[in-house]
Every structure is written in C-alpha cells, then in structure tokens.
Image (tube, rainbow, N blue to C red):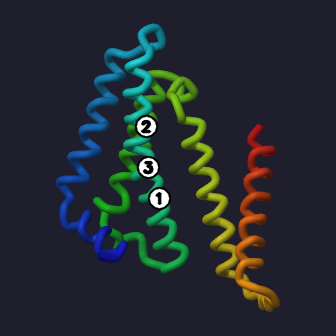
Amino acid sequence: MTVQDFINWFGNNPNLILGYFLVIIAISIIGLLFVNQQNFKSPITYLYGILVYAVTIPGLLSLILVLYSFFFLKTNLLQLDLITYFVPLIAMIVTLIIINKTISMSGIPGFGKLSGLFILIMITFVITYILQRMFFGVFFVGNFQYLIIFFLALLFGLKIAWDRITR
C-alpha cells in the first residue's frame, strides 16, 4: 500500500472523514455552551487537549498535502478531492475558532508544542521548496557517515536558532 492508495482510500470513504470531524465540531460546540474560564479545570482541559490534537494533526497533514500537491506536483487545486484534502483543513480552522471563543488557547495543555511543530514543519517545507527550485552542484568527498553528521548538525543548528527566536 502506498501513500497515494491511503489517500485514495479516504477519498473512497468520505463518511468516515465527515463523521469524524462532525463529532469533533459537535463536541467543541457543546463545550462552547457549557465551558467557561471558571469551570475550565482538570478533566475538561484534557478533553480540550484531545480535541485540539484530534483536529489539528489531520488538518496539518491535509495542509501539507495541499501545499505539496500545489507547489511540488503542480496539481490544479480544483482537481483535488474535496473531502480528503480540504475538509480536515476547514474542520481544523472551524474547531480552533470555536475552542478559542470558549477559552484561551494558552490554557490548553500542549498547544504551545503543537504550534511549534506547525512552525517547524512550515520552515522545513519552505527550505525544501527553495532547495528544489535552486540548481547547485555539490561534490562531497568523504564517507556517507560524514554527510549524515553534517545533515544532523544542520538540523541541530536550526533547532537551536528556532529556540532562540521563539523565546
């Protein structure tokens, strides 16, 4: 099974995707009616953390798929499957807006780590896109292990730089 087969499977089973995101949006709307800053305590904070992660991870994957299809594959966005590519993204935006109206996102456990992951993914995507568009010749004399060590050092430097930027 390839990744494209997996994406096609979701396209062939739209009820699963729609049901999943409708349940998450319904729970967040119920939370909008009953949760406020005063009763936002331990079990409810974890429920909101689960809701945010349950909608954001598929939404981020959907965003990556859309951007990859548009920038790398040069696919027409009008030809992409609406359910597979856009419903998770729209559901993520709607759910996060509803949750943000209920309580502050900083009160949700782990939300800072999730936003940091999103930013790191976007930086990696931009670097990959720039490297794909550039033509440069590289001649590396040495073992493959040295190349891996160089790559890991570059990633470590990027992480240190990012940590300093976000302080």
Query: Image point 31% across, 28% down: which residue?
Result: 29
Label 2–label 1 contact, CB within 8 A: no
Q: Position of residue 166 (x, y in %)?
A: 74, 41
Q: At x 80% / y 91%, what residue is drawn?
A: 139
Q: Earlier in the sequence, mark 2 or mark 1?
A: 2
- Distance between mark 3 and mark 2 Cα atoms: 8 Å
Mark 1 residue crowding within 10 angstroms, few (<14) / some (14–19) / many (20+):
some
Nearer the observer: mark 2 or 1; the answer is 2
Residue at (69% x, 74% y) in the render: 130
Q: Decide which of 151, 56 is in the foreground and name it.
A: 151
Judging by the rendered image, the residue that carries numbered circle 2 is 52
Kind of residue at badge 3: Ile
- Quadrant of the rendering where the N terminus is positioned: bottom left
Q: Which residue is mark 3?
A: 57
Residue type, label 2: Val
In primary-sequence order, the first of circles 3 and 2 is: 2
Q: Is residue 8 above or below residue 158?
A: below
Q: Say what secondary structure mark 3 lies in.
A: helix
Instruction: Find disc 1 in the rendering and name its residue.
Output: 63
